[in-house]
Each structure stands twice: as structure tokens, then as C-alpha cells.
Image (cartoon, grey):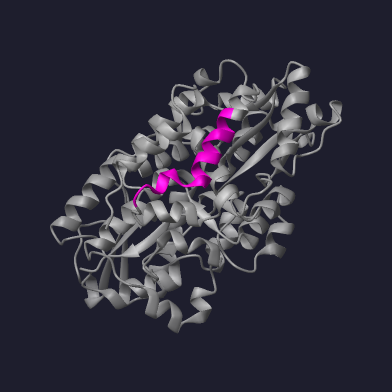
Amino acid sequence: MQAKVRMSRRTFLEVAGGTALTTTLAGCFGVGGGQQTTTSGGGASTVTIWDIRTNADMKLAQSLTSDFNNTHPNIHANLLFFQNDPYKQKLQVAMGAHNPPDIFFGWGGGILKSYVDAGDVYDLTGVLNADPSWKGRFLPSVFPSATFDGKIYGVPINNTQPIVFFYNKDIFSKANLTPPQTWSDLLNVVQKLKEQNIIPIAVAGASQWTYLMYAEYLTDRFGGPGAFQAVLANQANAWSQDAFIKAFTAIQQLVDAGAFGSSFSSVLADTNQDAALIYTGKAAMMLQGTWNFPVFNTNSPTFIQGGKLGWFGFPSVEGGTGDAGNLVGGTCNYYSIAKDTKSPESALTYLKDAVMNTSAISQMINLGEVPVASGISSQLSSAPHSDWLQFVYQSVQKAPNFQLSWDQALPATPAQTLLTNLAQLFLKQTTPQQFAGSMNKLITPS
């Protein structure tokens, strides 16, 4: 379900990972309160921001906004928080009525593009390019998810969440194994682990979206970013490209090799059953989002404290044209300015001064997050779990391409069909060619 699924699971995993949440957001909470207006007390311009972050991330945004208001007497930032699903509906209605917030939270990808196509989003390209110190604050690899036709429509606001392999170091050590660097290496590791009656790779198939990670990485490794870009460009029969067919075939190769065990379709990600298989020693590896690190740290702190958790990037594929440094996953979230804002200059000031500033970066690192900010290696090296933080940061910093997860990049209908087809692919209920044909039917060539 495109962004709906992604944000729902991410929020849940954050809670399960130890960021305490004692109540759900039933409505909204604001910094400054009140309804959207264009002026505030003393003639100050009011900027209304809609957001959906929770827990520590919500508190951080509130604190940064309060600081902004204290230092900008002529601008009053009114920050409001909503639950995930009602937010999407509310934003859609507000955009359609040409009465949106000045600044709105988003994921980039398909949802943001739909508003861009409707002419509802302010083009940030010129102001960012005119202020290199502002644009240079962010890692370049995260801008593409909010860039359409060469124009930038969103500013990164938080941490990055690429997909990586986690693994149990004890299992690897006892089996005399090292992290696989190539696809052949991975297949060899799978075979050796199977011989020892250990599930080679934990996958939470009951949640379906976990299947997506294999399709994304394998397609990239076989054909590079251009393969999926052809889908986004609505090129006829784009899903039948060799990169997709080879990727889907490789997935079924893993299934046939027993890489995921015999009951993977009943494992649930929402309750972190896949991670539990790793720290209990029942499975050796797991391809998952970096949001799982706090899950390990909370549910089995001794596993991390004992140095038993390892990680590595997705292997290269022999004969493929994709760069082994390319990433997939959640690039970050974004703030965008509505085209109908009555206070564009004030909204821009808020983005420049209250988003990813020095204080925000420091506080995110203290929360164990990796902000999408440039030049923070030294801060990460002195933080708790610095080896993990630096691995994530350097992976994103060096990535030639960072592909937003397909269920976010695509519109809602093809995104849901994609997940359904992936479940059938993993269960050997469809062939790679049938999968491609089903998805091709949803392409409307421009």
C-alpha cells in the first residue's frame, strides 16, 4: 500500500525498538496551537506545518520549532501532528480545496509526485541552488526521491533508513563463514548453513513488504537504476526487461535452495519475529531496514553488547551492470512547501533555519539515528554504537544511487499489486514472466 504500509510499519517498529509510546495520537498536537492563519500576534507571519512523526522524533521537531519561534519574532511556526492514515486523507482534501498547510510532511516518491503533477507543490530548485551552504547541508543521494523532471520539491528532515543484511556473528564464526561479497558467495553460504540445520535467511513473509527488498536489490544489481526508472517513466512493457526477469528468477533460486526455511510465509515483521530468529540463533541472516538495529538493542541488548550482531551490504551479482554500492530503502522523509502558501518567504526561512540545523543533527545522533547531513563523520565516531552509525552513514554517503522503495515510489494501485505478485513469486505460485506481464498491464504509456 505504498507509503501507507511503509510508514505504518516503520512507526510500529520504532515503538517496538524501544522508543516508548504510551498513547496513540488521537487528533493532533501543536506547537503554538490554533487554526491556520496568515498573521499572528504582533503582525508576525504564521507558517503552519503538518507532520506525523511520533515519540522522540515528534518531541525533537517540537523543540526545534519552539527554538525557531523564539529566535524569529516576525514569524510564528505552528506545528501540528496527525495520525498517519488520517493525515494522508486530510492533506489530500486540503490540497484539493487549495487550503493546504504552508509546509507538509511527505515520503517523496509517488505521493509527492501526484501533488507535483497537480501543480500543488512549490519548486525549491532555484532557492536551493542559490544557497549552496543550505543545499550542501544534505547528502546528495537523498534528493532524487523528491526530484521530478530535474526539479526539487522537498527538503530532507530526518534520518536515513537503507536496507542492509544483519547477521549472527556467532553462527558465521562456528561455520567458518564470512559475509558474502557476491551472489555466488551468498548461495554458497546458504548451502553451508542449510547443512547445519540453520535457517540461512530470516524473512517475514507474512508481512509481504519484506519480499520487496530482494526484488529491489536484485533488479538494481542486474540492471542498475535505469530498469526501475523505465517503470516510473511508464515505458511500455518495462517490467519485462531482462533485469526484472533475472531478479525474479534469482529470488526463486533462493527459495528453491531453501534459503528462507520452510515456514517463512508465516513469519511476521510487525512483531519482529524475523529479528528474533537471528538473536536466538535459529537463523543466520536477515535483509531488513536499518530501523531494526534498535529492535535488536531493545529486545536482546546482550546480543549487541556481546558483539554478536554484524551487518553488510547487499552483494554484487556476477554479470550485472548495477553498482554494488547502490542502496534501496527509505531515503528519508521530507518537508515540502505548498504552492498555495500565503507566506512562501516565511516557509522558506523555516526550512532553512529549523530543519537539519546543528542542534537537530546533534540530537538525532544522540537518539541513535543517522541524519542525512553532510560532514558528520566525527560526530558519529564518538557516539554510542559508532561502528553501526558510521557503516550506515558511509553507505549512504558513498552510494552512487539510493532507490526509494518501490511501494513508495509507485502510485497506490500498482504498489499493492506488486506486493501481491511478490508473495505469489516467493511461494512459487507465479513465474517471473507472469509476474512481469501482470505488472505491465498497469503501465499507461505517456
Q: Is residue 279 visible?
A: yes
Left or right position of 387 against 54: right
Q: Quadrant of residue 3?
A: top left
Left or right position of 213 against 74: right
Q: Is residue 4 visible?
A: no
The residue depicted at 75 percent of the width and 37 percent of the height is 185
Name the one closer to the observer, 236 or 284.
236
Quadrant (top left/top right/bottom left/bottom right) for the N terminus? top left
Left or right position of 324 against 227: right
- Residue 351 position in % (x across, y down): 40, 69
Magenta residue check for 240: yes
- Residue 335 position in % (x across, y down): 38, 61
Quadrant (top left/top right/bottom left/bottom right) for the C terminus? bottom left
Q: Which residues are magenta?
A: 236-252
Badge count: 0
Name, please, the residue furthest toward the bottom.
Answer: 130
The residue depicted at 74 percent of the width and 44 percent of the height is 181
Magenta residue check for 46: no
- Residue 316 position in % (x across, y down): 68, 47
The residue depicted at 55 percent of the width and 38 percent of the height is 214
* Overall secondary structure of the magenta section: helix
Above or below, 130 relative to 185: below
- Residue 246 position in % (x across, y down): 55, 40
Name the one closer to the observer, 142 or 368.
142
Above or below, 99 relative to 128: above
The residue depicted at 41 percent of the width and 59 percent of the height is 334
